[in-house]
Amino acid sequence: MAILLIDNLHTGYPGKPIISGLTLPPLTSGEVTVLTGPNAAGKSTLLRAIAGLLRIKGSMAYEGQELEALSSQKRAEVVSFMPQSVPTDINLSVIEAVISALKASPLDAATSGNEQLYKRAIAVLERIGIAHLALEPLNQLSGGQRQMASLARSVVREPKVLLLDEPTSALDLNHQLKVMRLARSFAADGRIVVMVLHDLNLALRWADHVIVMDKGIIASHGRPTAAITPEIIAQVYGVAIRVETCSLGLPNLIVDREL
Amino acid sequence: MSTTTAAIEKGYRKQFAKRIVLLVALGLATTLSFFFDMVVGPSMLSVAEVFQAIFSPDAVELSSRIIIWEVRMPYSIMALLVGASLSLAGCEMQTIMNNAMASPFTLGVSAAASFGAALAIIIGVSLPGVAGDWMVIVNAFVFAFGATLLLQALSSTRGAGPEGLVLFGIALVFTFNAFTGIMQYIASAEALQQFIFWSLGSLTKANWDNIPLLFALFVIIVPFSLASAWPLTALRLGEDSARSFGVAVRRLRFLSLLRISLLTAGSVAFVGTIGFIGLVGPHIAKLLIGEDHRFSLPASILSGALIMSLASLASKAIVVGAIIPVGIVTSLIGVPVFIALILNKRKR
């Protein structure tokens, strides 16, 4: 079991610290961790820091290896990041974009033959369920299709840690469930999957582990029903909720009112 | 292999082949334009005479040989080289700045290079140890590179959108034009005449001394540019994504800026300011061939060379017997295209 340990993390933007001295519970392979919390809680900032997109102080270690000590290329072998938004005006086909994700920096020699890379790109599109869009230009796709294509690019290099920033924000119900099922299957491959989600019902049903953040710190964490409680939600969102068990025996969050 | 996989593979290969055909077609069109450019000129040589002078120079009169080899050929080759260089610089610039309006001319890099050249031509100032004709080249490069660094610093500032970058570029154009104006104001009559002749953007400055220099610069830079095709394509998917794919974006940008500055400075130093090729060339290339930089970079090179060659042809054909400075022709063609791009962007 691989572990990502984040200890005493300080990060943010120039002149605007967002996270100061954050220590996370260990993130383990095979698990889907959902980061949630109100707007400006620091969720995306945390994800971007792990992805190496922000300057940090503190420690982020995967299997004892400090991520900050790795070159861009080596770090990309460990961590991959799917951004919240992607450019809309790109004149590249879906498969070209996936292949460019593979060719952007060298992969290990065993899998870098062109034919193998090409097959790997198609396999990922098939797994994500968008092989039928392979030859479509990105600038002619819907927002949801672009998001699925972005997911394909972020997973194609087979990272050990997969970071997904609001991967369901532009998706319809059916595709939201698809993405959550895919996130679970990426974790089942032995990856650490960390995703930012606003939909607490998706978090309750699909996450192994939930971290509720507020103002750059952890408000609660643990198994979904332990982390998402009426008390915590009232405290961080100012909203009264109930978590009830539905007829299928699954937890279901009901929003009652603002507090 | 599933039906889908086979269909994707077939479609992908077809797309690949179509792009190769387009590149070959662009190459052929450029070659054709180059020969027409050689045929047209004030001294009314026939097509047969021109071809004879090129392929068996000893069989034609000395005057025809001199016209072809010493006047028209350098002029036509310089058109290809300058068009290719500026268009390649424009293509890379649009990608690394994530801005469809970026080009050496529109964002002030050419104006900065011109000012550097003015410093050398008018008051003879350059870096220590640099002398003679090299002063113009070195100064053009130093100022072009400085301007690209400034643009880069601005484009990486949070909140500076594509419009902000274009506005800053316009500010750079005016600033460097004003500095150049000051240089002209204090220049001696002789230096001023020399500078005006230089600044018009004319291919008549092409000769067998400066062509090898620009050719060498171009041939050295192109492989580095093509070697960056994949990371540049990945950068089109957003900086965060590119970094997540293992691209060292800061290094990629720096080296690309270095190439842009060298290509722009080389062109400006030898033929003066040529407008809009760096904007229009890459746009035509990307429209034809997409944004896979393995194809869009060579397509930009070829489309830039083709447009410049056609502009050179037009500069000789518009007024029979006279050669209009080619910079004027490219601006006349470029301005409507530039406006169309802005309007098109607004619509979206």
Image (cartoon, rainbow, N blue to C red):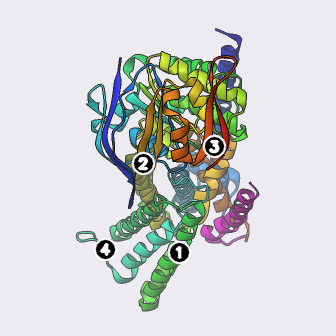
Look at label 1 and name its amino acid: Ala
Q: Chain letter of disc 1?
A: B
Cα separation between marks 2 and 1: 40 Å
Assess disc 2: are there few (<14), some (14-19) or many (≥20) residues with their C-alpha within 10 Å of its C-alpha: many
| Part of the protein shown in magenta | B320-348
Q: Is residue B104 magenta?
A: no
Vertical arrangement, residue B14 with respect to residue B186, above or below: above
Q: Nearer the viewer, residue B285 or A58?
A: A58
Helix, strand or loop status at disc 1: helix
Q: Chain letter of disc 2?
A: A
* Residue B242 locus on image (x, y percent): 48, 40
* Residue A106 locus on image (x, y percent): 40, 29
Instruction: Using the rendered view, name the quadrant where residue A2 is placed.
Output: top left
Of the residues under marks 3 and 2, which one precedes in the sequence?
A: 3
Cα separation between marks 1 and 4: 24 Å
Helix, strand or loop status at disc 2: loop
Look at label 2 and name its amino acid: Gly
User: What residue did someone put label 2 on?
Assistant: A216
Q: Is residue B104 left or right of residue A61?
A: right
Cα separation between marks 3 and 1: 28 Å
Q: Is residue B259 left or right of residue A8?
A: right
Q: Nearer the viewer, mark 4 or mark 3?
A: 3
Q: Nearer the viewer, residue A83 or A254?
A: A254
- Give a yes or no on whether discs 2 and 1 share a subunit: no
Q: Is residue B206 left or right of residue A94?
A: left
- Give a yes or no on whether discs 1 and 4 share a subunit: yes
Cα separation between marks 3 and 2: 34 Å
User: What residue did someone put label 4 on?
Assistant: B126
Cα separation between marks 4 and 3: 42 Å
